[in-house]
Image (spheres, grey):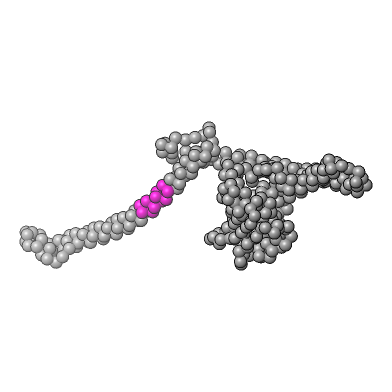
Amino acid sequence: MGSLIKRQIRKYLPEHLAKDKDLAVFLDAVTKSYSYYDEQYAMQQRAMALSSEELFAANGKLRKEAASQKKVIDKLKRVIKTLEFYKLSETNKTDSNIDLDGLGLIEVIDSQTKDIIKINKQREKLLSELAYQNQELSDYAHMVSHDLKSPLRSIDTLTVWLKEDYKGKFDDKGENSLELIRNNVEKMDKLINGILEYSSISKNRKATYTIDLNLLIEDILNTLTIPKHITIKKAKNLPLINGDKCRLQQLFTNLIENAIRYNDKDKGVIEIDFKSKTKFWQFTIKDNGKGIDPQYHEKIFKTFEKLENNTDSSGIGLSIVKKIVTLYKGKIWLESSLNKGSTFYFTLKK
């Protein structure tokens, strides 16, 4: 209590009380009481200030946690909608308008997860069975092809012996019959080779390495029988690509052979070209031959499909081409019109 307040109190007290010695003790007690109250009040103020700061910090933390949980819940709801879109569970579908709580979301996701695990196990089983069946089919193709080649070689040998031993004794009809037998044997042999090539494309995939297409195409053109009336134009500086020589040789050989075989023009022209795209090479093999009706553009890539009865064709060449391109994660298509020629396009990844 201040000295001025004490003086004022003494001023308004009766004289005998104002001079009483005990009054000083009383006033000191009041002063001490005020001081204690002030300290208590200050302490309470400090405590309240600290509590407010803590509450503010805690409140901010709770708001962040609530926002984070809301994001998680929203993502979980989107996951559920995605699962429902693909119909992974027919028995545990949820109404997208229902505001699921955390437990409900967990139950739905748990159910969908079990469905996914079940589907994956079924898929793995099917893939395993498919791989086994493909292996059996490949082995069967090789076995049958081997068994067929032996009698074919015998038939071919017998026709040669007949032609030599009875030379001059066959009339024209007999000679034609022998030639027909040999032609059919040759056709069957090409068909068997085609089946073996087709069945072995995806089997025992070989390591890839850098191949110079300029040298590869030159090798192919040197081994093919190219008629004098056909000119083959090759782009300069063909690219270096990753692959295995055997597969790429099959790919280009089949397309170039087809362009030669089905060119009916007096001056046949075959062009081999390419373009560099961002992620792949695009190749073209263009000819001015017979052309292909648009209605057969898809059919010709199927196994054993032929547009005409040509003994030189096995009906497997273009299916082999497509399988090789697919193996290298590319695409193949064509543009063609009757009597105007054909352009085969295919892509290979860089």
- The answer to whether residue 206 is magenta is no
Quarter of the image for residue 346 reads: bottom right
Give the position of the C terminus as an image quadrant. bottom right
| 147 lies left or right of 309 | right
Name the outermost residue toward the top: 91
Residues in magenta?
A: 59-71
Give the quadrant of the N terminus: bottom left
- Residue farthest to the right, as pictured: 165
User: Observer-nearest residue: 102 or 75?
Assistant: 75
- Percent position of residue 188, x then y: 78, 44
Instruction: State the residue at coordinates (56%, 62%).
Output: 276
Q: Quadrant of residue 56?
A: bottom left
Q: What residue is rendered at 34% in x and 53% in y?
A: 55
Q: Name the one closer to the observer, 77 or 123.
A: 123
Q: Is residue 68 magenta?
A: yes
- Residue 42 is situated, as x and y percent measured from the top left of the image, at 26, 60
Residue 324 locus on image (x, y percent): 66, 52
The spot of residue 348 in percent (x, y) is 61, 57
Q: Is residue 338 left or right of residue 9?
A: right
Is there any visible trace of residue 172 in the rendered image?
A: yes
Residue 329 visible here: no
Left or right of 156? Residue 192 is left
Front residue of 114/313: it is: 313
Nearer the observer, 47 or 85: 85
